[in-house]
Image: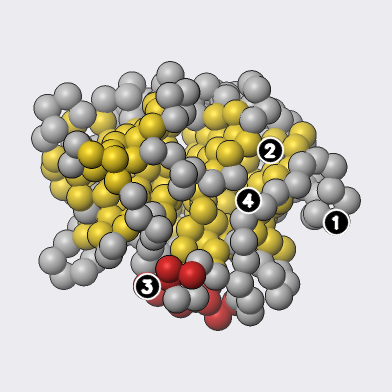
Amino acid sequence: MRRGVILLVAALVLGGATAGYTLWPDRSAPAAGRSTLDLARPGRLLVRDRATGLVRGSRTRCDRFAAARGTGVCLLARPGAVPTTYALILDRTMRPTRRVKLAGIPSRARVSGSGRMISWTVFVTGDSYNGGAFSTRTGLLDTRTGNVTVSIEEIPLVKDGRRYHSADVNYWGLTFAPDDSRFYATVATRGKTYLVEGDYARWQARVLRENAECPSLSPDGGRLVYKKRTPSGAWRLHALDLATHREIPLAETADVDDQAAWLDAGTVMYGKGRDVWAVPADGSGSPRLLATEASSPTIT
């Protein structure tokens, strides 16, 4: 993850943490407000307002937000000596139906296109292999079965054709395929980052390529957009055709430290600075402004 972001989070955190969760109800957790939004209404663009933290058009405050097909996830940080995040699972009216208590600071959130699968990533501290620096925890929730996987770090990983083992494996930025089992994510280990493909049902994962972070899968499952580290040290958005393995840089040339989301079949959106922008996913065109003073763009 980006050094500047990690330093900012470090300034907010006073102690170490270990992963854990508790389920609804938890009366100590902050409650989300009622809303007139309908998350089941297809094709609606929603964003989080940076000034208030509210999902625009609602009374629900989040630090990270995502939604699809009538299901939402709201990551809400609770300050304290031990950092805590609540993953609030929202129904179509933005009403919380379940809460998962996590140790850490919100980083990423995603809902699968069907609304069934939910993922989150949080920053944590205290891993012995990391010398007290920041690590990540990425978890999953299957709304159909109710099963929660607090961390996917133990998923069997294959690299270079062999089972890979290392204490410093960290995952973040997960994105789901249309079948709700296959997924893509970033894995970091031994100073490098990799794009991995995983399978929730089979509980396995494999490395696809180096230097590809925070992937986002197209609605048809055919392309990935991710940020790639350039020789200058900045990140630039790239698209990968999964059938041909052809990779192209997108027309956004600025340093983008975000997990992009798909606005439609041919366009991705992302946070840049304090605003949300969009750019074609085929390398053509130019960036255009979607929403000012906003973050966490998502399409219902």
**Residues at marks 1 and 2 touching, judged by CB atoms closer than 8 Å:** no
What residue is drawn where x is 48% and y is 70%? 128
Q: Earlier in the sequence, mark 1 or mark 4?
A: 1
**Residues at marks 3 and 1 touching, judged by CB atoms closer than 8 Å:** no
Residue 44, above or below 42: below
Cα gap from disc 2 to disc 3, whole angstroms: 30 Å
Task: Give the residue at mark 1.
Answer: 28
Cα gap from disc 3 to disc 1, whole angstroms: 32 Å
Task: Give the residue at mark 3.
Answer: 3
Q: Earlier in the sequence, mark 2 or mark 3?
A: 3
The colour scheme of the drawn protein is: secondary structure
Q: Earlier in the sequence, mark 2 or mark 4?
A: 4
Under mark 3, the amino acid is Arg
Q: Earlier in the sequence, mark 1 or mark 2?
A: 1
Task: Give the residue at mark 2.
Answer: 89
Cα gap from disc 1 to disc 2, whole angstroms: 16 Å
Task: Give the residue at mark 4.
Answer: 75
**Residues at marks 2 and 3 touching, judged by CB atoms closer than 8 Å:** no
Q: Quadrant of residue 2?
A: bottom left
